[in-house]
Image (cartoon, rainbow, N blue to C red):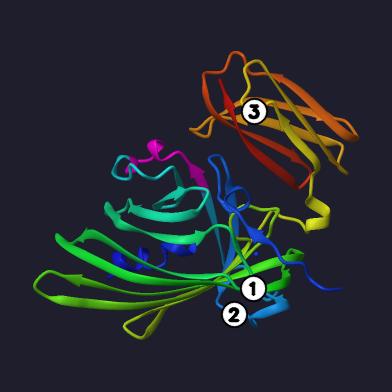
């Protein structure tokens, strides 16, 4: 049963009047090279649904930490088992495999390393669909299987996903305007051939998103197995600042596709900045830093790079912007 628990909540590792935001693939899907850090504590109340809410999650305790490293699936131990995945998250002891597209961010499977176990989704679970904004909702059915103690376990479930609120989010490390809350509710069961259902699960989760950060900035999760509470926690993201403090402006990258030189322009209140060009494996190919106030500009030669897709990552203070480019 301990091994089963690891894969019960893998989807959780995976937002004046308040404006509404719309989640899109470009603003929400993680990209190769992203590192997301969370502080975790016991589960707390998620607050109310609705427009113009204020969610005070400042009471989340610091009892443990979690780091997710987003990498190319081919760089992982079990990547070959997930040919449709285009990004993977790595944490201590477990990898999760996803497909991020312009229309959805879907879970395709997971791998646990201490007692090697591979969970393969024969019908992936859509964790988010795009575009997604307040009052949007959908229902997704999914299936998966894995081998535990020499027995094949078949998992079948339904995810009901709704953007049930927007407003101000208060975390231990800051206050954030224009957050969108997504309620993610799962019911699923495990069964064995000739035996039938061996376990049933409910997974009640809430995720908060901001337009300036990819991936969720906070979440609350309550998992029950056979009606008994099992894994209940709250989580908030560290290393982020309020929207007004962290936003880059006038951000542009051109031309795209590019043959010889890429032009990068942006403005921020910080003087120091860095520009990185990262390949699909997550390796930084070019890294430039500068000290310029106001409008910043870089003209970088990419003529020596192999043809393909790269990520341009610009950082200034706590602000980060990214854009994918094609080198021809």
Give the image location of residue 282, x and y in percent. Answer: 52, 34
Q: Is residue 321 above or below residue 129?
A: above
**Which residue is pictured at 62% across the width and 52% down the height?**
214
Q: Does the segment drawn in magenta span residue 157? A: no
Q: Earlier in the sequence, mark 3 or mark 1?
A: 1
The disc label shown at residue 29, or none: none
Residue 235 visible? The answer is no
Q: Are marks 1 and 2 in contact (CB under 8 Å)?
A: yes
- The residue that label 1 is drawn on is 60
Q: Residue furthest right?
A: 293
Look at the image and give the residue range highlighted in magenta: 69-79
Q: Quadrant of residue 4?
A: bottom left
**Label 1 environment density (alpha carbons within 10 Å; few <14, some 14–19, many ≥20):** many
Q: Is residue 70 magenta?
A: yes
Task: Label 2, secondary structure: give it.
Answer: loop
Q: Earlier in the sequence, mark 3 or mark 2?
A: 2
Look at mark 3 in the image and give the residue it sits on. Answer: 256
Disc 2: which residue: 44
What residue do we see at 65% from left, 60% from top?
22
Depth check: 7 or 62 in front? 7
Q: What is the quadrant of residue 112 in the picture?
A: bottom left
């Amino acid at each position: 049963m301990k091994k089963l628990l690891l894969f019960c909540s893998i989807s959780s590792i995976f937002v004046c009047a308040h404006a509404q935001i719309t989640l899109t693939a470009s603003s929400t899907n993680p990209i190769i090279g992203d590192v997301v850090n969370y502080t975790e504590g016991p589960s707390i109340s998620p607050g109310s649904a609705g427009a113009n809410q204020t969610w005070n999650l400042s009471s989340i305790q610091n009892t443990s930490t979690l780091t997710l490293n987003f990498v190319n699936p081919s760089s992982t131990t079990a990547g070959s088992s997930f040919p449709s995945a285009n990004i993977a998250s790595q944490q201590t002891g477990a990898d999760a495999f996803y497909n991020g597209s312009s229309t959805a961010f879907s879970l395709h499977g997971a791998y646990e390393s201490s007692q090697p176990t591979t969970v393969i989704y024969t019908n992936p679970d859509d964790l988010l669909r795009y575009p997604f904004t307040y009052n949007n909702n959908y229902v997704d059915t999914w299936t998966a299987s894995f081998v535990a103690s020499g027995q094949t376990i078949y998992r079948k479930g339904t995810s009901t996903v709704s953007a049930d609120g927007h407003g101000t989010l208060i975390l231990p490390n800051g206050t954030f305007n224009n957050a969108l809350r997504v309620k993610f509710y799962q019911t699923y069961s495990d069964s064995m051939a000739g035996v039938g259902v061996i376990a049933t699960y409910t997974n009640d989760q809430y995720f908060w998103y901001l337009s300036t950060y990819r991936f969720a900035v906070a979440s609350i999760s309550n998992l029950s197995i056979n009606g008994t509470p099992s894994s209940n926690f709250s989580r908030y993201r560290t290393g982020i600042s309020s929207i007004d403090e962290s936003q880059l402006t006038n951000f542009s990258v051109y031309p795209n596709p590019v043959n010889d030189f890429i032009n990068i322009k942006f403005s921020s209140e910080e003087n120091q900045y860095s520009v990185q060009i990262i390949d699909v494996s997550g390796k930084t190919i070019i890294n430039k830093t500068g000290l310029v106030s106001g409008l910043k500009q870089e003209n970088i030669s990419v003529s020596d790079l192999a043809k393909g897709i790269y990520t341009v990552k610009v950082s200034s203070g706590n602000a980060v912007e990214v854009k994918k480019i094609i080198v021809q």
